[in-house]
Amino acid sequence: MILFKAYPRNFSAIQADVDEYMPYDVMQLLDKGISNNIQQIILEAPYVDKDFRDTYYNDFSKRFTDISRDSIRLHLFFSPDNVVTPNYGGFITLRDTKIRTIGRSYIAPKALNNFTSGYCCLAKYEVNYRGQVLEVEAFPWMQQDGNVSRCAHIAAWSINRYYSQRYCYYAERTLHEITTHDSTTRRVPSRGASVNQIAQILQKNRFDPEIYIRDNGNKEETPYYTKECFNRLMHTFVESGIPFIAGVKSKHAIVIIGHGELSDIDSVMNDNDGLTDSYEFIENLIIVDDTQLPYTNVFNYEDEQPYAYIFDEIDVLIVPFYEKMYLDVDYLYSEMLPALENNILKIGKQDKIIRRVFLTSSRSFKKYMFKESRDSSYRELMLLMQMPKFIWVAEYSSVEEFKKQEMHHRIILDATTLKFQVDAYMAIKKDNEVAVNNKSLKSVTVHIDKMSDVIYQNLGRIK
Amino acid sequence: MKGIRRLLEQEDLLSNYQPVDSERQQEWNLAFEMVKRSLESEALSYMERERTKTTQIAELSRIKMLG
C-alpha cells in the first residue's frame, strides 16, 4: 500500500514523521526555501525513485549500515485539496542517504522563496499523482549524497536529465550511470571529477562539449579571457538557451540555466559608445547548485546574500554543444563579427548600438519568425531560406529599439561552417536591405519593407 | 541535385523582392571582398593562438577537480 498524507506547510511536522529521511539541516533548507505560498504538502511513501534505486543497488546495498531502498516523495501544492496542474508546484524526493537526503526533485521556480523573475531553461515533466497526471516545468535538481556523487556528477546529471526530457536525441541516464565515468583511481567514495572527466561524461551522452577556462594556469601571464570577455561568453550561452556547467573557484560545479531581469538600459548606455554587448545589462545569472535549493543567483557584484557567488569566481565553463555547432565562439567574437561589423554594418565609435549574439536552431528561429516577425517581406525571405541545423545570430539595436525589443541589423551565420571558411554568412539584414548568401537562392541583396523587426528570444520568461 | 537547383532557378523565389540597384550591389560586393581579405589575413595568427590555448586548456582540464 502507498500512504498519501497531507500536511500544511510545516516541515517540523513532516520531519517528526519521516525521521532520518529529513535530517535537521535538510528540514531547515526546505523550511527556508520552499515558498510560503505553498499551503499544502502531500507525502507519498514508499516511493520508488529511479535514480536512487539504481544507486542503491550499485552501491548503498553493499554497505553494512541499514539503508532503505525506498524513497519518500513530497508533492507541493499552492492551495489545499486542489489536485490540478496550475496548483502544482512540483515534488521533492527524500532518500535514506543519512546526510544530504534530498534526491531527484522537479520544483517550479514559483514554489521557491528565493526566485523573483527572469529568463531560464525549463523542461516540462509529467508526474503521476495517485493515477492523475500533473505537469511541472522545472530544471532537474538534487543534493549530492557525498559518497557516490559529488557536485560535478549532480551538475552533469541535471544537464542530461534536462536535455533527455526536451529532446529525444538524448537518452535518459540515472545518477549512477553518470557517476561511472572513466577513472584511474576508485570512484567511490567519490572525490569529484576533473574538468576532463565531466566533459567525457557529456561526450558519452551524445553531447559535443567544449571547455573554456578563464586563466592559462600561470598567474604571471595574462589570462585568456578578460573579465568582460568571459562574462560575455557565459551570457552568450545563456542567451542561446544552452544550460552549461560552470566551475566556481576551480572547486565547485554548478549549472547556469538563465539570467535575471535586465538592469536599467539608460544608466548603462550613458557611459558607453560604439558597440555594447547585451551582457552588460545582466546583473545576475540563474543557477542550479546542489548545495542550495534551485534557481539561486550568481551576481556580477558582491551581494549580501549568504553563499551567493559572483561572476568573477566562475573560472571554468563546460558547454554541452550539439555535434553540429562547429563555428567557434572565440573565432566569432575575435575575427568574424568585427570583420562584418567594420566592413558591412560600418558601426562607428560615435554610434550607440547594443549587440546580442546567440546560437539557435534554424527550426526554432523560423518558428519564432513565423509567429513574431512584424515585417512580412523579411519574414517570408527567412522562411524560404534553406538553413543549416544551427545558426549563429548577431542582432544590433539602438537604445530605443532595444527597450522595445527590436533590432535593425541582423547577421545570420552558418554554425556548421568549415573552419576558416570566409563566406559563412547566410543573410545580413542592414536596415531595410538583406544580403542573401544561400545555396538554393541567388546571392543577391534585396529590399525589405521595414527598417526594424523584433529581436529573437531563446528563453522563456518566468514571473 | 541539378534538377532541384534548376527548379528553384525557374521558380525565381526572389521575384517578389526588389533588388538593390547595381551601384548599391557593387558596394555590398566590395564590402564582402573586404571581409574576405580581413578574415584570410587573420587566419594564420588565429590558428597559432588557438593551438597554444588548446594545449594549455587540455592540460588544465586534466588537473582541475570539481566536487
Image: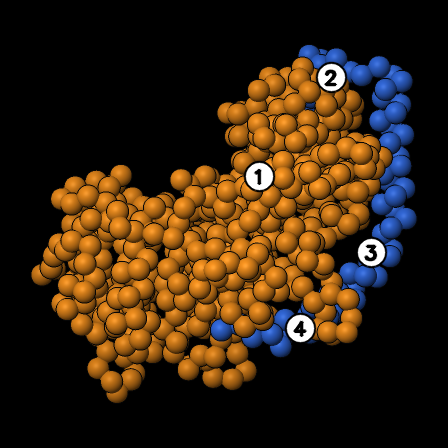
Q: In orange, which chain?
A: A
Q: Quadrant of residue B24?
A: top right
Q: Chain of mark 1?
A: A
Camera-nearest residue between A433 and A304: A304
According to the image, label 3 marks what residue? Answer: B46
Q: Position of residue B31 (x, y in %)?
A: 86, 31
Kindly identify which chain the residue marked by label 4 belongs to.
B
Q: CA distance from mark 2 to mark 1?
A: 34 Å
Q: Helix, strand, or loop for circle 4? A: helix
Distance from Cα at disc 3 to Cα at disc 2: 35 Å
Secondary element type, mark 2 = strand
Q: Are marks 2 and 1 on the same chain?
A: yes
Q: Residues within 10 Å of mark 4 (few under 14, many from 20)?
A: some
For the residues labelled 2 and 4, the Cα–Cα distance comes to: 50 Å
Mark 3 vs mark 1: same chain?
no
**What residue type is disc 2 on?**
His
Tag 2 residue? A447
Name the residue: 44% across, 79% down: A190
Earlier along the polypeptide chain: callout 3 or callout 4? 3
Q: Which mark is residue A393?
A: none
Q: Quadrant of the N terminus of chain A?
A: bottom left
Residue at horizontal 57%, vertical 27%? A404
Instruction: Identify the residue shown where x is 82% and y is 56%.
Output: B46
Q: Is the C-beta separation of discs 3 and 2 under 8 Å?
A: no
**Kind of element beneath mark 1:** loop
Q: CA distance from mark 1 to mark 4?
A: 38 Å
Q: Is residue B5 left or right of residue A463?
A: right
Quick check: can you spot residue A91? yes
